[in-house]
Image: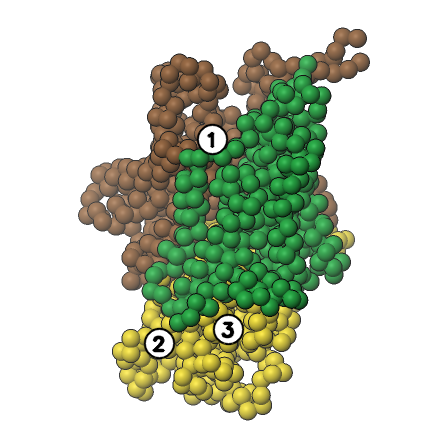
Chain colours: A yellow, B green, C brown
Amino acid sequence: MRKTMAMAVVLLVWCGSAWAKELQVGFVYVSPVGDAGYSYAHDQGRLALEAMGGVRTSFVESVAEGQDAERVITTMARKGYDVIFATSFGYMDPTLKVAKQFPNVKFLHCSGYKTAPNMANYFGRMYQARYLTGMVAGAMTKGNLLGYVAAFPIPEVIRGINAFALGAQAVNPKAEVRVVWTKTWYDPAREKEAAKSLLDAGCDVIAQHQDSPATQEAAQERGVYSIGYNSDMAKFAPKAHLTAAVWNWAPFYKEMIRQIQAGTWKADAYWWGMDRGVVDIAPFGPMVPEGVRAQVLAAKEAIVKGENNIFTGPIKDQKGVERVAAGVTMTDAELLAFNWFVQGVVGTLE
Amino acid sequence: MSWEWFLPIVAAAVQAGTPIFYATVGEILMERAGILNLGVEGAMLLGALAGFWTSMVTGNPWVGLAAAAAVGSLACLLHGVVTTVALANQVVSGLALTILATGLANFLGTPLIGLPAPGFDQRPLPGLSALPILGPVLFHQDVLVYASYLLPVLVSVGLRRTRFGLRLRAAGESPTACRAAGLSVLRLRLLACLFGGALIGIGGAYLSLAFTHLWTNGMTAGRGWIAVALVIFAFWRPGRAMVGAYLFGGVMAFQLRLQAAGTTVPSSLLLMLPYLLTVAVLAASSRFRGVAGAPAALGTNPEPSE
Amino acid sequence: MALVVRKRREPLPWWGSCLIFLAAVALALGGGGAMLALQGKPALAGLSVLIGSAVGSLWAVEDCVLKAIPLFLCAVGVGLSFRMAVWNIGAEGQFALGAVGATWVALSLDHLPAAVLLPFMGLAAAVAGGLWAGVAAFLRALLGANETIVTLMLNYVGILVLEFLVFGPWKDPASFGFPMTAEFVPAAILPALPGTRIHWGLVLCGVVGVAVTLAMRSSRLGFEITVCGQNPAAARYARMPYGALMAVVLVAGGALAGLAGFVEVSAALGRLQPSIMTGYGYTAIVVAWLSGLRPLGVAGVALVLAALRVGLESLQLDFQVPAAFGGMMEGTMLLVVLAGSFFSRYQILRRPA
């Protein structure tokens, strides 16, 4: 407690003094930071920045997307923040609006598609990790029925489900993925109910695009397997957790700040993948056999080397219509706007 | 296809209905004493938080459950004091309780998001769980569900056959007569808040200790309000509350299972079902409100005696 | 010496509730400071950041006013029904439907000039919000269904209706499959008042405030609503049309919440997306009750609560206070005012020995 007080005093002194040569970096989160989940992953990245020299960070959590976001971002810009990370899709328009008013502040918006001379957008190729977890799930299922508890039908989530299905089919052509939408990022009770509905439908490996580990719990109670998301969720279900698709923002955030300090930063669209370490899979659970591990790690190697781009044709959609021709790889623009399911996924898109 | 596919839904309905059931019975107790409590949602949320936190710290879910009951009682007592002592409007005080409790729970609970805590697991009851149909539906649950099966009997007998129960109901039917008989309406109503609040707190803790073993801000997600609606549906009787709560649990479980089975109906429309059902049930049962035994003095505060 | 409680012949006049409200604000701030101190943060510095960043500069005040506009509209509507002791807590859903109605017009009549399009959007929003509240009025009048629960359940349904539209039929194909409608044409965007960042919603608030005040003070309707709220038995005896009056307050309240939805979707977002729902409808209940249900009071309280929210963001930024801090302060204020209203209706006297 004394430490926080001392920090606050130091902070106050700094606010008033003129030698704020340090880079002031602000983060805007859509949900409470908590101890798992999406905002938590970003906050881990922020803490990594604190360890760098010449950087001071702060954040505002639970900021609604819309007018509130615009005000918070404006406040940060007015208070003299040099770099502002807006970490949720809905912050895109507000960030752009504020970026136009503050040309000297650098804005980085996560998961959108708009840029400006002083506003970059960034995201991670989570679908690469999803593909690998799909391989694990496809290899471990006995009934060839995989479940996926998913939050909202937006491209980011759809892309992940598709990559998961393709990964599963790569090792098990009979694998089918059932999707249940919860329409919430974080509601353990509803997520668990959704997971159970998938288990009752006969799924024996369930994955999630949710922020709580409720899905993992449901799998462990039923004695089947699960795949985590955001961070290593093994501690919540050691007997069920096969692996997880995880975020690791530290290398990206550090590189951005380094470039800004060096004056070489450009307002680009950054979409880093497994090769730069922004996404990865968590350590395998003990139940994953050696053969599967080797296969998945070989695929990871191929992804890192750029030999496997995952969304390379032929890819058919749910109705069996070929959407990507053989040998063709989907462009980033197409991936960003993903709004159809690949063959083998059962679920609606609304 | 055999009929057995139906059993998991019913079993899930019982589980999803249990937190609502506890809260509904708690609210029935309070309303029978004349206190309309629209703070159920808030009190449940505080119960869920207190139960989770205590279980996490002590490592014992039973201690957590006790804490949840105590905090539920305290929250409802606050409402009781504001309405019976400060004579504030019951509707507004209940709303205020929900707002305050939600704020408090979110404030205190934010650091606990994503942490694990010990809770209650599903344990089949030896013997009974082998019964056909009833076994998998009713007796493959956790201990809090089993305990809830006793509630209707306990509460009905308590309200009808004990002296305290009769007095409690008198405070809700006719505070003036009650006072004339030398009873303290204030004391009776506060006691109703104490007992009812404990059940409401346990209902909340069911979510964070049994249904999942996790805490999140706002995790009651409207269940407290459904409980208030179910009291009317139940005609202020615990037995009917059980039916109503399971009906709701059933709809919640059903709409997600429809999705898992691969329906093409948009998920937003399916998610509306529980809420639409609440409105329908309320509309259907409100007609009989008069004959159904709504406590005559429900929602009114007696003037202070000179 | 003993104390007795006696009912006042007349409740304390307006300054009484003002005093209670100020006491509530003071207590809430004190409580907030105590919470800060408990967390080992400098309480006084925190409170000065909270207040300073909410009212300390012109742009901060503009932010407060912008945030207070939808709160005011929702709260005046909610207050109308509260005056009649009809408990409409569905402003959130009515707000959602209002936004949907305005969006429908903005998307389908986008060739019209602003002078025609904007009023049409407002009208559609008011009708949509009013109809949504009308469901509760209908069920209450016909079957006696409790309006509190019906309006609350319709909040959840209304938000899901909005989500259904933006995830489905209204999804903008140009927005990469994200759940939002196309951006509105410039004619569908409520412009700012000259020289400020504040939009014309403020003028709308003024019109609504004056209209509601006049209607409640000097029309038969207003009189009857007040009587029904204060003394339903007397109202029944005087053969006032209770059911019709209830429908009027509910539908009017819904229409006002709908207007708030229109203002937000047009001026703040410029397109419909799920993030428009930020709980204005729920906060409006707090505002309505704290304000003593008079439009002028509503304006004051809406500004105070908006300032609290705005100031809190700076407090978070500077001291890393969790976001839920605000909800707690609001709840404290509400309970203090509630308990305090006892003193405006009753007095405590010394019993002569």
Helix, strand or loop at mark 1: helix
In the picture, measured across the screen, residue B233 lies left or right of residue A49, that is: left
Q: Is mark 2 in CB contact (under 8 Å) with mark 1?
A: no
Q: Residue at x 54, y 66 (%)?
A: B132
Q: Residue at x 63, y 21 (%)?
A: B177
Say whether residue A157 is visible.
Answer: no
In the picture, measured across the screen, residue C67 lies left or right of residue A16, that is: left
Q: Is mark 1 in CB contact (under 8 Å) with mark 3?
A: no
Residue B290 numbered mark, or none: 1
Placement of A108 over or under A132, stated as above or below: above
Q: Residue at x 38, y 41 (%)?
A: C94
Separation of residues labelled 3 and 2 (CA atoms):
18 Å
Chain letter of disc 1? B
Question: Can you tell which quarter of the image residue C132 is in?
Answer: top left
Q: Which residue is mark 2?
A: A342
Q: Which residue is mark 3?
A: A206
Which amino acid, mark 2? Val
Q: Earlier in the sequence, mark 3 or mark 2?
A: 3
Helix, strand or loop at mark 2: loop
Residue projecting furthest to the left: C111
Q: Residues within 10 Å of mark 3 (few under 14, many from 20)?
A: many
Residue projecting furthest to the top: C352
Question: Does mark 2 fall on the same chain as mark 3?
Answer: yes
Which amino acid, mark 3? Ile
Q: Nearer the viewer, residue A73 or B296?
A: B296
Which amino acid, mark 1? Gly
Marker count (numbered): 3
Say whether residue B133 is visible.
Answer: yes
In the picture, measured across the screen, residue C280 lies left or right of residue B181, that is: left
Q: Nearer the viewer, mark 3 or mark 2?
A: 3
Residue A23's x, y, as percent?
58, 61
Question: Does mark 1 fall on the same chain as mark 2?
Answer: no
